[in-house]
Image: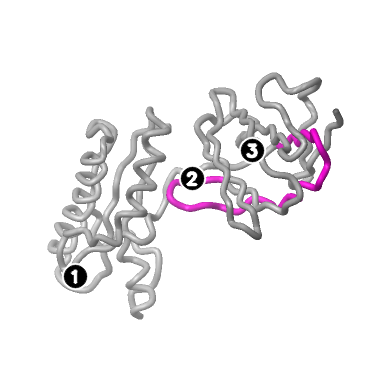
Amino acid sequence: MKKLYLLLSCLLLITLSGLAQGLQPTSNLALLKGKVTNFKNKALSNELVLLVNDVTKASFKIATDAKGNFELLVPITATYSLKYKNFTKEMDYTKMVIPSDKDAIYEVLIKIDPPKEFVLDNVYFDTGKSTLKPNSNKTLNDLVDVLKLKSTMVIEIQGHTDNVGDEEANVKLSQARAESVMKYLVSKGIEATRITAKGFGASKPVADNAAEEGRSKNRRTSLKVIKD
């Protein structure tokens, strides 16, 4: 059995040796063995890693264990996009080619810095209200999956508005919207003790409120990691 090593961002993991102790490669499935760490080399557990076939779009997903390791069997003779899940977004990491070699083992090291604050794109409310629109469900359900995987994580849901209208009313609206998101997460099985909600109104803009493009960016729902 031969080993093939994949270079990712000039980082090569060659610490594993010998035959695979868990999954085994076959004549048509390669074994991808990997580790996910931050840039201080701390192992990251419960991180979702995805390998997506560039042609068929078939997706293979695995979560890292307590030591940041993962093993995944994938079909050979294909080009894949290696991704990781950043809360509700799939983030591209690198491309990798799995050639036709039989019984191949690839070993990869992925280095990321998970964010402490994150904007929840595609969370929508009725105009001037705190009622969540149905097209918010996918994003929020993705967040539910992450929070169930990261069972010790504590977060704050933050609501923000633009500067149009009464300041006090904007604070109340942003608070109500943050609470709506919190209630949705709780309804899907996330413990209420792990979530707080805070409305900031227009006090924390991320863009210029002078134009609609900027105002639309300021009308947002975000989360802050309180405890990993």
The residue that label 1 is drawn on is 127
SS for dot 1: loop
The residue that label 2 is drawn on is 115
Q: Position of residue 129 (x, y in %)?
A: 15, 64
| Residues in magenta, as a range | 84-108
58, above or below 217, in the image: above
Q: Earlier in the sequence, mark 2 or mark 1?
A: 2
CA gap between label 1 and label 3 equals 42 Å
Q: In the current view of this chain or complex, which residue is farthest to the right? A: 2
Quarter residue 212 falls in: bottom left
SS for dot 2: loop
CA gap between label 2 and label 1 equals 29 Å
Quarter residue 146 falls in: top left
Q: Assess disc 1: are there few (<14), some (14-19) or many (≥20) residues with their C-alpha within 10 Å of its C-alpha.
A: few
Residue at figure coordinates x 26%, y 35% from the top left = 189
Q: In the current view of this chain or complex, which residue is farthest to the front? A: 27
Is residue 36 inside the magenta stretch? no
Is residue 98 inside the magenta stretch? yes
Task: Indicate which label's residue lies in the foreground, 2 or 1.
Answer: 1
Label 1 amino acid?
Thr
Of the 4 image quadrants, the one containing the C terminus is top left
Residue at figure coordinates x 19%, y 70% from the top left = 127
The residue that label 3 is drawn on is 39
Label 3 amino acid?
Phe
Q: Earlier in the sequence, mark 3 or mark 2?
A: 3
Depth check: 21 or 168 in front?
21
